[in-house]
Image (cartoon, grey):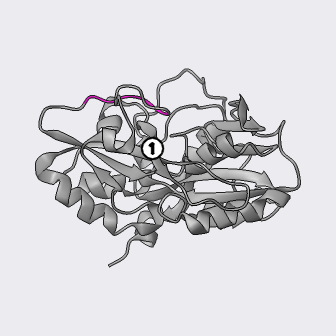
Amino acid sequence: MTAIDRNASLPANRAELSPAQARELFRNGLVGPTAGFSRGYAQANLIIVPKDQAFDVLLFAQRNPKSCPILGVLDAGETSGELLAGGDIRTDVSQYCVYENGIKIAEPTDLNEYWRDDLVTFIVGCSFTFETALMEGGISIAHIEAGVNVPMFKSNIRSACAGSMSGPMVVSMRPIPASQVSDAVRITSRYPAVHGAPVHIGNPEELGIMDLSKPDFGDAVHIPAGHIPVFWACGVTPQAAVMESRPALAIGHAPGHMLITDARDSRYLVP
């Protein structure tokens, strides 16, 4: 395949692409947020650490299941698995973040320069997974309609510490019409493996968020009259812990640039 221009607009047919087709586009250079890609398939966050840090990450996820629901783990040095059959975790995400001692040093589009055989990959549930269900329920998604990344914020909710890992819960925000908030809660509560029901509805200041126009990650979205900001736990939370805890090396996805998995959304739907 011919390499994709990294400045090109996202493909108009992105919702119809299979996960393998979407990953191939990213492998060949397409960069952009993945909301709206491969409708019906789960998307996932990443946190990749050396093997000697992996137990702390696993324990952190176990103690913070709302923000860090683990969908799968690739053992040290593994680059593919069930959730990305035939894929490569080093190349098949649109963009990554590389941290040294808690400081982001690079945002590469592949990890070939940074990959080591002792790296363990945690694949963590993402709220993009339930957006199809929200839209099918008649609820519009502001960042998808605007063609931008979802807004994400560091909150004042502290994650439970685990070993060397500590930090704030990160939340994603979607403005929901007041008349549909209960529907959004009902729909998303059926997807506990991808963050489930919201953690907060309404006043952002109660979460320590003073300005919704200045997200810590992603892009701001317009909040129309009659809409209420609704906040879900976010899988960027492990990266916030990395920034605070400062391990020697950690790698994540660029927020909003998710791994598109081969798992159907319905796999994570509970009755």
**Residue 243 picture location, percent across and down:** 66, 40
Which residue is nearer to you in this view: 45 or 247? 247
Up-down: is 141 above or below 183?
above
Left or right of residue 2: residue 171: left
**Residue 250 picture location, percent across and down:** 74, 45
Corner quadrant of residue 57 = bottom right
Left or right of residue 184: residue 126: right
Q: Which residue is mark 1?
A: 155
**Secondary structure of the magenta portion, mostly?**
loop
Is 69 contained in the magenta span? no
Residue at the image point whose x is 41% and y is 36% from the top: 151
Residue at the image point whose x is 42% and y is 68% from the top: 192
Q: Label 1 amino acid? A: Ser
- Which quadrant, please, contains the N terminus? top right
| Label 1 crowd (10 A; few <14 / some 14-19 / many >=20) | many
Up-down: is 259 above or below 268?
above
Quick check: can you spot residue 255?
A: yes
Total marks drawn? 1
Corner quadrant of residue 207 = top left
Identity of the residue furthest to the bottom in this view: 271
**Residue 127 picture location, percent across and down:** 43, 53
Quick check: can you spot residue 36?
A: no
**Residue 128 picture location, percent across and down:** 42, 50
Magenta part of the chain: 217-222
Is 218 contained in the magenta span? yes
Q: Dot 1: what SS? A: strand
Residue at the image point whose x is 67% and y is 62% from the top: 162
Which residue is nearer to you in this view: 176 or 132? 176
